Image (cartoon, rainbow, N blue to C red):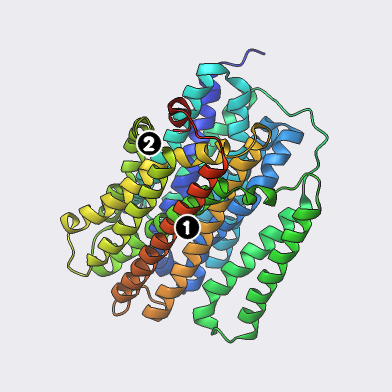
Amino acid sequence: MRHHPAVILVAVLLSTVSLPVSLTGASVALPDIGTDLHADLASVQWVVNAYNATFASFMLATGALADLLGRRRVFATGVAIFTVAGALSAVAGDIVLLDVVRALAGVGAAAAATSASGILAAAFQGRARARVFGLFGTVIGAGLAFGPSIAGLLIEAFGWRAVFGGPAIVGVVVLALVPLLPESREATTRRIDWAGSGTFTSALLLVIFGFVEGPAQGWGNPLIVAAFVGSAVLFAVFVRVERRRAEPMFDLGLLASPRFLGTCVAAATIVTVMVPLLVYLPSYFTAVVGWSPGQAGAALILLTAPTLVLPLLGGLITRWIPAPAVVVFSVLVVAIGAAWLTVLGPGVEVPGLAGPLLTIGVGIGLSIGMLDAQAINSVEPGRAATAAAMINTARLASETVAIAVVGSVLATTTGGRLADPGFTGGLRTVLWSLAVLALVAVLLTAVLLRRGASAAPRPSAGDRVAVS
């Protein structure tokens, strides 16, 4: 059967844009979900946390499965799981059921995302592959950028259930196109690292459970203490397992490269600032400022739109300024924006938020794509795929933990209500903390990248353009 490139592209991009929309869209819907299902804050937070945690945890394992079993097969399975979970989320009448199926949706999203990139890599070659992956990245950015706005409009028109039903409908369309996709797999004897996947996933879920349930259960509660202790033990076991494997899921040896480690620190810091804002600012705008879900989603375009426009500019800048310097500058800009955003309050208007939101967005936009290229170019060619997987896992794990930690702070300051009194003060505390964290990351990233540059041959101008 002849596989038409346009059909491949449409199927992959439709599934790809649904994944970030499902995250940011659910964030906008949280207040309405809590009201409709009579759920407390901790239960509502799992709607986002469960999806993100399983998405992050299963990325590497599902990527290995796609290489072994076939990318189309794993893609179809992932989209099917994501679609069924979305449909169940749309009709859920109980918060526990909603949380469980959201965790299931994250597993499907991980399978669909990892196998989608493999399908594109196998179907397109040379310049066509470069153009296709550029479009692939743009679509992911568009999903993040416009997900809150789309979700706000859907909520106002059809209610919060449409936020999950919409992506499920898209999933049905993608499944109809699956028979037209080519199958591909790697000729490899490599085995899936079940021990590494299991310990990493369990450790991540336990630490998230501790932060989400801690404010309600009490930080001294034996269950919460056991969650944190268990997470630490499992992370230690994970490190031990990965060091002993000949072909580990997470190649810890790459962290010995200062350049790679510095790039991961920058990437993790940027999502640690951005994603919690995407999750909790919509609730603040609706509960405290008094905006509608549509207005809240539209305001967040100021934060996310630069991610669509600036990646190309970042590439051009590296013709004159080394990419590591641009990376450090990007993290610094994000830190400044987070501190500036503390101007928010109950009477704030969009013009007052435009400056700080755009500033954070500029820092994020300049670094998109560049960080991945820096990570890949900091290791040997034979370990490029592992480096790419590791930096993506670092991003997802960091943003998942950040959402849980920020939610824990806000639950404590608001008494579990996400409303004033307490929401404004709690959010300002979070923003100042994120700004300080980003400033520390600026110094650490600068030291690591400089150390990495001194340990490697000095790149030519052409190399600097290539990594952009």
- Position of residue 48 relative to residue 248, above or below, is below
> What residue is disc 1 on?
444
Does 15 appear above or below 390? above
Residue 248 lies, in percent from the top left, at 75, 48
Single out the residue that lies furthest toward the top. 2
Q: Residue at x 63, y 31 (%)?
A: 118
Extreme residue toward the right, this view: 189
Picture residue at 64% right of the left edge, 25% below the top: 179
From the viewer's perspective, tell me whether residue 68 is left or right of residue 313: right
For the point 21% across and 53% down, which residue is it?
Answer: 355
Callout 1 crowding tier (Cα within 10 Å): few <14, some 14–19, many ≥20:
some
Q: Earlier in the sequence, mark 1 or mark 2?
A: 2
Q: Is residue 247 left or right of residue 137?
A: right
Marker disc for residue 311: 2
Instruction: Name the residue type under label 1.
Output: Leu
Q: Secondary structure at mark 2?
A: helix
